Image (tube, rainbow, N blue to C red):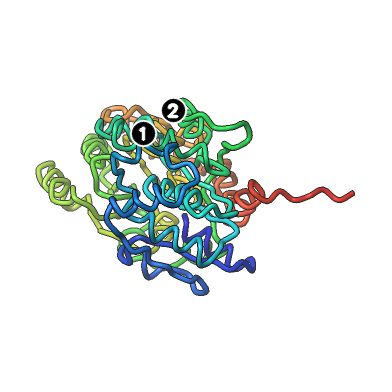
Amino acid sequence: MMLRLAEHAAVAGHSVDLLITRKEGDHLNNIPKGLNVVVLAKSSRVKGLIKVLTSCSNPLRFISLLKLPRFLTVLQSTSHYYVKRKPDLVISTLHTCNLANIMARECTQSNTKVIVRECIQLTSFIQSVPSREKTLLPFIKLLYPLADKVVSVAKQVEDDLLTHINVAEGKSLFIYNPVIGPDFHKKANMPVGVKWLNDKDTYVILGAGRLSKQKDFSTLIEAFSIVKPKSPNMKLLIIGEGEQRVSLQKQVDKLNLTDSVTLFGFVDNPLSYMSKADLFVLPSLLEGAPNVLVEAMASGCQVISTDSPGGASELLKNGEYGNLVPMQDPSILAKNIFRVYKTNNPNRKGQKFALGLTMESSLNQYVRSCFPVKSQT
């Protein structure tokens, strides 16, 4: 999502720097041309703390940083960037980067506008690792109110965030992700590496995401095993990679689904798979505003999602744009899969909504939140 925002900002004529903490990952090859990539060097947490104590006008305000939170490792390099480049606007995402950017602005006393982006429901994120209540939450409460804007990726994510932090009126808002780019249809029409995706007689269910506990593909595989005997022409394809690959493959083999379920691995262009699938299923236990759900709807897929904490139900308009099911319930999921399989109605409303979540509309909302357009008099 940050790459898409950055890409459109460059296309719109802005000078864009892309700040990253590590030059690695699956998306390195997707960095758009025209971006100046800056790798933020890491230092010790103590050096980051010294930066706070020696640079802030009121360091006692940040006395809790004596606990040496992780974001201090990139505070020096982030502060150096603020001094050197003097950016007009920084849009940051993920907690470590958000906290570092807010603190860097405080250390440098810069005029830079800082927007931090909250992409997941904070309550569930904290509960999933209880230690975060002490190691992360106090610093979010301390620093998020100092940002110019706190942007959540869905209204439900914003409402949850505001139960934890106190921000001034007008500072908090939600902006849906910039999912649809100008090359959307080109990407959707590209060929794929799975022959039976192009077979009209095969009903293809697609799952996409990291093979992790949070995404809960185990429940999807279990549900598929229930519904498969009723629909022999059905196949399940899961694209993505992760730490649960081995256990998921063992589950597939144990259920004798090797010929019907494929764990395909990471793909650069999931849109080309979505546009050729019949049904997209998101079985997650926790989401913010799931981009894959929007991409699937925009591609014309029928969709089923768990009603997990976050913005899935919001994006599906509480079931109007797709089926919502309880989490970790393979029986109910199987019933919904079979119902959609039998009716096979086009998802026109969901597709229209999803196609409206463009890069342009999202970036305009971010920029105008800090630099409002003055009315003409």
Which residue of the protein is positioned furthest toward the bottom in this rendering? 33
**Mark 1 secondary-structure assignment:** helix
Residue at image coords 44%, 69%: 37
Residue 352 seen in the figure? yes
364 shown above or below 218: below
Q: Amino acid at mark 2?
A: His
Q: Where does the image place residue 32, in percent across and percent down from the top left?
A: 48, 70
Residue nearest the observer in this picture, 248 or 70: 70
- Left or right position of 64 against 223: right
Depth order, front residue of 87/355: 87
Instruction: Please name the residue shown 30% across and 65% down the image.
Output: 24
Numbered circles on residues, count: 2
Tell me if I can see residue 334 in this picture: no
- Mark sitting on residue 87: none
Q: Nearer the viewer, residue 214 or 207?
A: 214
Residue at 41% in and 54% down = 274
Identify the residue under disc 1.
137
Q: Find residue 164 and name its label.
A: 2
Local crowd at mark 1 within 10 Å, few (<14), some, or many (≥20)? some
Image location of residue 304, percent across then percent down: 40, 38
| Label 2 secondary element | loop
Task: Look at 29% across and 36% down and name the residue there.
Answer: 135
Asked if marks 1 and 2 touch (Cβ < 8 Å), the reply is: yes
Q: Say left or right for 48 vs 156.
A: left
Q: Residues within 10 Å of mark 2 (few under 14, many from 20)?
A: some
Residue type at mark 1? Answer: Leu
The answer for how far apart the CA atoms under marks 1 and 2 are is 8 Å
Image coordinates of residue 84 in percent, x first then y, are 50, 67
On the image, which quarter does residue 271 sit in?
A: bottom left
Q: Looking at the image, which is closer to me, 68 or 173?
A: 68
